Amino acid sequence: MWCSKLLRSTPARMLLVIVGLSLIVWGSTHPSLTGLVLMMVGMVPTVSGLAGICLLDEVHRSRRARNLPPGQPREGRA
């Protein structure tokens, strides 16, 4: 998947961390439920950028595992 390769690159991971941190900072300036939601949403790209996890790749992998015939290992391991 081309987008998972793109999102695993170093510049894209840095961009994810910057976007996530900016959402967290922006949410912290709003003393309401909106601010809390913005901070929680900002944690997703921050953590995925720091950990190097591509969420789209994980969704694609789970859909592929759901379509396996019975008796076959789910993660490609025996």
Image (tube, rainbow, N blue to C red):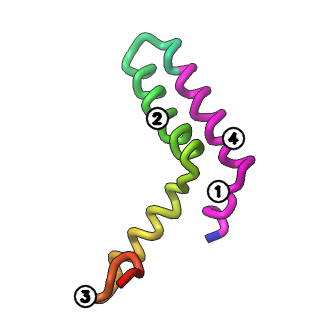
Task: Tell me the SS state at disc 1.
Answer: loop
User: Between disc 2 and disc 4, whose residue precedes?
Assistant: 4
Magenta stretch, residue numbers? 2-26
Looking at the image, is 62 positioned above or below residue 77?
above
Looking at the image, is 70 positioned above or below residue 31?
below
Task: Tell me the SS state at disc 4.
Answer: helix
Task: Tell me the SS state at disc 3.
Answer: loop
Location of residue 31 in the rendering, given as x and y in whole percent from the top left corner: 43, 10
Q: In which quarter of the image is residue 32?
A: top left
Residue mark closest to the camera, 2 vs 3: 3
On the image, numbered disc 3 is attached to which residue? 70
- Judge left or right: residue 16 versus residue 72: right
Location of residue 10 in the rendering, given as x and y in whole percent from the top left corner: 72, 50
Q: Which amino acid does label 4 sit on?
A: Leu
Label 3: how many residues lie within 10 Å, few (<14), some (14-19) or many (20+)?
few
Query: From mark 3 to mark 4, how far is it between C-alphas?
Result: 40 Å
Q: Quadrant of residue 50?
A: top right
Query: From mark 1 to mark 3, how far is it between C-alphas?
Result: 32 Å
User: Between disc 3 and disc 4, whose residue precedes?
Assistant: 4
